[in-house]
Amino acid sequence: MSRYSLGIDIGGTFTDIVVFDSDTGGRRSRKVLTTHDDPARGVLEGIDLILGQDGVPADGIGRVVHATTLFTNALIERKGAPTGLITTRGFRDTLEIGRERKYELYDVAIRKPEPLVPRPWRREVAERVRADGGVEVALDLEELDRIAAGLVADGVTSLAIVFLHSYANPAHESAAAARVQAAHPDLAVTRSSEVAPEVREYERASTAVANAYIKPLAATYLDALAARMGERGIGASLLLMLSAGGLTHLAEAKRTPVQLLESGPAAGALAAAHLGGAAGGPDLLAFDMGGTTAKLSVIADGEPLIAHGFEAARQKRFIEGSGLPIRISTIELIEIGAGGGSIAGVDDIGLMKVGPRSAGSEPGPAAYGRGGREATVTDADFLLGYLSPDYFAGGDMGIDMAACRAALADLAQASGLAPERAAWGIHDIVNENMASAARVHIAERGRDPRDFTLLATGGAGPVHAYHVARKLGIRRLICPPAAGVASALGLLLAPARVDRVAAMTCRLDAADWPALEAAYQAMAADAAEVIEATGLDPASAEVSREADMRFAGQAFEIVVRLPAGPFGPESLPEIRRAYEKVYVEKFTRTPPEVPVEIVNLRLSLRAPVGGADLGRAAGVAGAGSSKGERPVYFPAAGAARATAVHDRARLGPGDRLTGPVIVEEAESTLVVGPEGRLRVLDDGAILVEIEDVDG
């Protein structure tokens, strides 16, 4: 009988593997360095440890869920497939024209995002569909044949087809895709109407091209991983985490891999919402810091916030408009280049800077002993005593403290500081970078960070969370069990999810209600087919209806959660009230007597996955948790001081400790400063209450 669930999360530095035993409620985990030349190799190394050393039988694994940053990195590093674009005559340069808006108005050296398709591979064909869906110019199939053959001859292996107004009538795109695929069966083809069937030509084209760019990579990687797991006797189907925090099956993931771009961070946010528990309250700031990046997301009323678009591969990390617009549903978060591998240096005017450049896993921080020579955040944390060289990654990874000290000595000399002060500078700067990002992220939602509880996950999150919380004025910090592999754990909590969108522009007071209801019913039927293909019962799914709405004359919309339906003329007052409520929350007041328009219809279907209730693993009390003391640096003391170190596995519910204290487990280390007091909760989570904060 299948009793085990397997979660796999590939990060920039570490690949995390978690196994959950549904019979006992036990969890086992492994952290292995990510193998960038062949990401599946690192995954399989971790799985082999689980199957071998941990004794999990391959035929006992009934569910495998996977998240990865592989496809996001392919966009950032421009390592996708040679991609072509066929579009309506006159629209070849949409990808470069964009919105004709500079994201930094006064920057004379501004660099716009480079299109994923070079201009010679962007071709035009005679066809035209009107905004109402009517055909203005029929598709020229003979010209299409010549264009497709030319692109293939030029070396294109993936193709995006983006025709004007295909959201209103996809017939031309469908006919073109079928004809090209028949003539060139090895060519990967993406239609814009299948990945982003909504208004706004540039955003739709950008999303379709991004999907085409990563589609061959996704198919090759996912098929190979599934086959190599099968060779080990794991017969369970491979499920993939979506950016919106749900699961889908392999075929759907290969069809639209653009939906997976933010899958890893989404898993972390799901885990935070689940692990926050009653102690954290309904409003959490989820802080996940790994080896390469840190992610921050707001959990409001127990649920992560959902957005319906984001920007990938930004030229300037915090500036809107500097990246590639992607129109998919995604958990709303902010990601910054602040991880354990972030490299520290001194700039031309003598100021210390940390990140966003990262040592990653190859060569990694100097302390890893793999050839890294530049000081990183992890190196600083070792020198400060926050991390133990004898118990890093559970003791499975050897640490070279001589290389660590040499890297920090070079930085100390360049900065004119003592090595310990330079190490604290690195730690403090990266904390301030994360706190600054959190302040902006929370302020944009009209909230105060002091109203939140900080929940720390990731291998480096619990190391830095205490000082980040103090900078934000947050007095409560939660560190769940197995925090270092929480994103992989979040994969096992996710429901199956399908999001669909349909364009339908109409005034609310003049809506064609039968057509509106029919559109929602059609989206629900399509989503149910995907849920069923995932192996679940669509009847168990929760349906959520939304719409992109605006006041007439406005250029952009807000997304509004609608009543359950079915819809008819009697639904108008309730839908308008729902829109005005969201509008007032965002803009304070509504304009007087202005009609409301619907632009896009949205629907999500979420079906629970059996065995996804992991419960809450409590700590195991033992005969004393103390592991002794070691020197640890805290700035108030101005020097390292003897600090108690405890084994988390031997801390039980109700145990209390007063800072400064270090709590170690195999996947991460929790650092609590002198102003903190910690208590182990009934579910095994550690609650830290901070008496003195800076914010």
Image: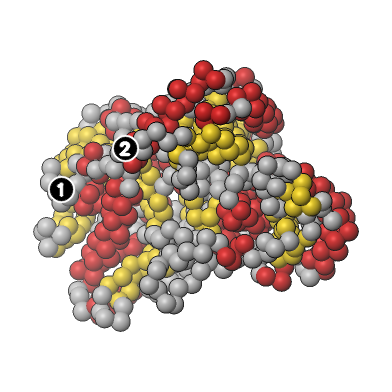
Looking at the picture, does residue 141 appear above or below residue 614? below
Q: Amino acid at mark 2?
A: Arg
Depth check: give the residue in front, 683 or 693.
Answer: 693
Q: Quadrant of residue 518?
A: top right
Q: Nearer the viewer, residue 368 or 687?
A: 687
Note whether residue 447 is visible.
yes
- Measured as percent of width and height from the top left, residue 112 is found at 51, 69
Dot 2 and dot 1 residues touching (CB under 8 Å): no
Q: Amino acid at mark 1?
A: Val
- The spot of residue 177 in percent (x, y) is 79, 50
Residue found 53% across the figure and 55% down from its top: 325
- Residue to which mark 1 is pinned: 693
Q: What scheme was used to colour the molecule?
A: secondary structure
In the rendered view, would you say 540 is above or below 319? above
Q: Nearer the viewer, residue 586 or 622?
A: 586
> Would residue 667 be found to the left or right of residue 212 on screen?
left
> How much space separates mark 2 and mark 1, taking CA atoms?
35 Å
Q: Residue at x 33, y 67 (%)?
A: 354
Q: Which element is circle 1 on? A: loop
Q: Position of residue 464 (x, y in %)?
A: 29, 53
- Numbered disc 2: secondary structure: loop
The quarter of the picture where residue 573 lies is top left
**54 versus 356 height, above or below:** above
Label 2, on which residue? 589
Choose between 11 and 410: the one closer to the eye. 11
* Direction front: furthest residue: 593
Q: Give the mark nearest the N terminus, 2 or 1.
A: 2
In the image, which disc is placed on residue 568?
A: none
Residue 303 visible in the snapshot? no
Vertical arrangement, residue 44 with respect to residue 303, above or below = below
